[in-house]
Amino acid sequence: MASNNSSVGKEIVSYCGKCKKATDHIITSMVTSIRIGKCQCTKCKAVHNYKDPEDALNPKPRKAWKPSEKKSDLSPTIQWQQAIASATGEPRPYAMDAHFAAGDVIDHATFGRGIVENDLGGSKIQVLFETGERTLVHDKCIPVAAPVTE
Ligand SMILES: [Zn+2]
């Protein structure tokens, strides 16, 4: 089974990143006697590492991003970008007397766009802004001097 006569100067089909498809290549270097190093595309003349067309066309699925595990490795800006990108709701202007729930997107006059991460209880929410996490007040009963009629 181990018959592999690849060597420098021989033709091989490799995936070409420039052509975006499997094309004929000429081997330009070998890593070991059976492992191809670099090859040159005969179409675009690009020299690159040999890429098995099978692997290139059927990439292995990447591990899904897990917010709870990966969080500490990410900067607040990256976390914020990912949170905003995955948020579905329409942003609402932040107000102390409004009620927010985890997952809500808010627009804060000072901190900008944020996403509610947690309802901390006691009229407090944890909100992730581009600059980092902040605890904000919500659901606050503001005494109304006179009944509002609209
Ligand atoms: Zn090419």
Image (cartoon, grey):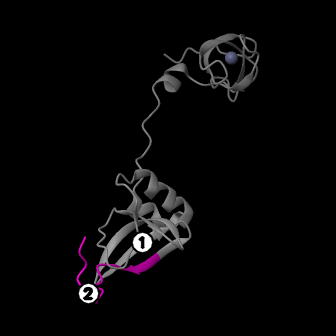
Q: Amino acid at mark 1?
A: Val
Point out the stretch of residues depicted in magenta: 134-150
The residue that label 1 is drawn on is 127
Locate residue 102, reporting x and y percent.
Answer: 31, 66
- Taking the image as four quarters, which one is ligand 1 found in? top right
Which one is closest to the eye, mark 2 or mark 1? 2
Contact flag, marks 2 and 1 (Cβ < 8 Å) = no
Mark 2 Cα shell of 10 Å, populated few (<14), some (14-19), many (≥20): few
Q: Earlier in the sequence, mark 2 or mark 1?
A: 1
Q: Quadrant of residue 33?
A: top right
Secondary structure category for the residue under label 2: loop
Residue 4 is left or right of residue 128, and the answer is right
Does 58 appear above or below 87? above
Residue 18 is left or right of residue 58, and the answer is right
The residue that label 2 is drawn on is 146
Residue placed furthest toward the front: 150
Mark 1 Cα shell of 10 Å, populated few (<14), some (14-19), many (≥20): many
Nearer to me, 7 or 102: 102
Locate residue 141, reporting x and y percent.
Answer: 27, 85
Locate residue 89, reporting x and y percent.
Answer: 34, 54
Residue 121 falls within the magenta-colored stretch: no
Q: Residue at x 63, y 26 (%)?
A: 35
Nearer to me, 122 or 54: 122
Locate residue 92, reporting x and y percent.
Answer: 38, 63
Any mark on residue 20, and which?
A: none
Does 3 appear above or below 88? above
Q: Residue at x 25, y 78 (%)?
A: 148
Q: How many marks?
A: 2
